[in-house]
Image (spheres, rainbow, N blue to C red):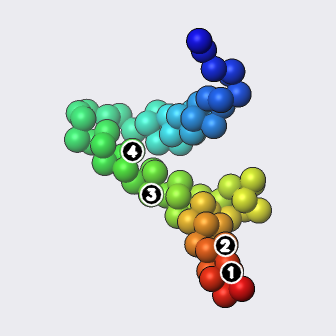
Amino acid sequence: MGGRYLDNIFIERLWRSLKQEAVYLHELQDGFQAISVIRDWIRFYNTGRPHTALDKRSPDDAFFNAERNQMAA
């Protein structure tokens, strides 16, 4: 029936970070502003925010550098 709690841990952590680092810091007046704040944060999360699990690299850096290394090999 239900999945294990560990199945959702990554998504739960993502939502927690989104709320703490973006949503709670803005006084959102409408859905358009919310979309803008969330879109900007997701872009930052993927391109600029260092992740300890990725040796303090952004997901984009980790993914695209690994992809380039595989193509060069």
Question: On the rendered structure, is 28 left or right of 68?
Answer: left
Q: Looking at the picture, does residue 36 appear above or below residue 47?
A: above
Q: Which residue is mark 3?
A: 43
Of callouts 1 and 4, the N-terminal one: 4
Q: Which residue is mark 4?
A: 38
The CA span between labels 2 and 1 is: 5 Å
Q: Amino acid at mark 3?
A: Arg
User: For this rendering, which residue is in front, 48 or 8?
Assistant: 8
Under circle 4, the secondary element is helix
> What residue occupies the far bottom of the structure in this picture?
72
Q: Which residue is mark 2?
A: 66
Query: Which numbered tag is attached to residue 69?
Result: 1
User: Mark 1 Cα within 10 Å, few/some/many (few <14, many 20+)?
Assistant: few
Place of residue 57 in the rendered image (x, y in percent of width and height, measured from the top left): 68, 65
Under circle 3, the secondary element is helix
Q: Residue at x 57, y 35 (%)?
A: 11
Q: Amino acid at mark 1?
A: Asn
Q: Quadrant of residue 30?
A: top left
Check whether the beta carbons of the residues at disc 3 and disc 4 lie within 8 A of each other. Answer: no
